[in-house]
Structures are given as C-alpha cells and as structure tokens.
Amino acid sequence: MDSSPATFLLSPAHLGGVRGRWLRSARSGGATAQRLRESGLPIGEAFAFISALYFRGKLAYARRFADAAGARIIAPGFGLVELDWPLDPDRVRRMHAVGVDVRRRAYCQPLAEAAAALGDERIVLLGSLATGKYLDVLAPVLGERLLFPRVFVGMGDMRRGSILLRAAKRGEELEYAPFAELARR
C-alpha cells in the first residue's frame, strides 16, 4: 500500500431523514438538538448522530488513519469542512436546502473549489460509489489522486460502516484503488 499522506473525504449524512428532521426542528427537546441550537455542534458529531453506523464508521476510520493531511466532510453548500467544524441551525438549514445534487451549482461549485485547494496528497473518498453524487464533482478535479476503499465496491452503507469500524478498531488500514479502476467496472 502506498504510504504517502492521504486526506479522507467523508460523505455527509442525509439531513432529510428522521434524525435529520429531528435535529433541524426548533421543537426538538433532546440534548443533541438543544446543544446544536444553544452552542453549536461539531459536524462530525452531528452526522454520527443522524447517520448512526455508517457515519460513525467513516468518522472512526478517518480519525484513526488520518495523518497530517487530515480528513474533511463534504458539507453541501460549503464544500469541504473539518471534522469539528461547528454546525448551528443556520448552517444545517443551508446544507439541507442545497442538498447533494450534482445539478445544483450551490452544491458542486464549493465542493470542486475546496477539492482543488487540497494539497498534492492522495484523496480517499469514504462515501457512495454507486452514483455520481460525489465522484462526478471530485473525479474531474482530483484525477488520479482520487481513491476509494477497494472493498466498498458492491457493498451497502451498513456493511461499509461496520467494515470501517472494525478496521479502525484493529488498526488495519484498508486497501485503496484509484477511481479509474472503478470507472472501468
């Protein structure tokens, strides 16, 4: 495996689901929603709450294996943000309004600009490979530097989440493949 530095890009949690709606609601009385409204909440923590297993796996894996290059989360409307980037109700509403939609400039432009600003390191996408919602924006910008965990091919979210959690716990980094390999399949 190439040992050069890698930046991990984590796909976002779906803000339109039950937990996302609950977190966005001004009437939610739970501790997580209350913290979001009162003092903000790190995006990684908020997305782990919303998505449960899959995002928790991505977060644990990125924290375990990210080096100086680090890890970023795709934040619709904002591009790429740090794992502890503070969410507040306005940012959550904006991300939900923009959504993950490659037909929308408000999603694509900030993401492409943030990806172009990354250093020369390898970029590992921890997210869906089955649709173009991330790859259509990232691949043209990152080219051969864009990688994915080879084991992700043909696998659903829950299974990917558990594989990432186990790999992080064992300290065994997954094997990465270039996006071009995925395109050939």
Image (cartoon, rainbow, N blue to C red):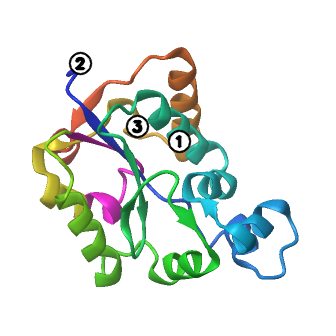
Answer left or right for 82 relative to 39.
Answer: left
Q: Earlier in the sequence, mark 2 or mark 1?
A: 2
Q: Position of residue 11 (x, y in %)?
A: 44, 55
How many angstroms separate mark 2 from mark 1 (CA)?
Answer: 21 Å
Rendering coords of residue 161 (x, y %): 56, 38
Kindly report the distance in space between the C-alpha atoms of the residues bearing marks 3 and 1: 16 Å
On the image, which quarter does residue 175 sit in? top left
Q: Which residue is mark 1?
A: 59
| Mark 3 vs 1, N-terminal side | 1
Q: Secondary structure at mark 2?
A: loop
Which amino acid is tagged 3? Phe
Q: Looking at the image, is 7 positioned above or below residue 36?
A: above
Disc number lying in front (2 or 1): 1
Quarter of the figure with the C terminus:
top left
Mark linked to residue 1: 2
> What is the number of the mark on residue 152?
3
Question: Is residue 72 left or right of 48 when viewed as pictured?
Answer: left
Residue in the image at 40% along x and 37% along y: 152
Q: Residue furthest right?
A: 29
How many residues crowd around disc 1 within 10 Å: few (fewer than 14), some, or many (20 or more)?
many
Nearest to the observer: residue 48 or residue 139: 48
| Numbered-mark total | 3
- SS at badge 1: helix
Q: SS class of the residue under badge 3?
A: helix
Q: Is residue 62 visible?
A: yes
- The answer to whether any part of residue 104 appears in the image is no
Residue 56 is one of the magenta-drawn residues: no
Q: Residue at x 30, y 81 (%)?
A: 103
Closer mark to the observer between disc 3 and disc 1: 1
Q: Which residues are magenta?
A: 122-136
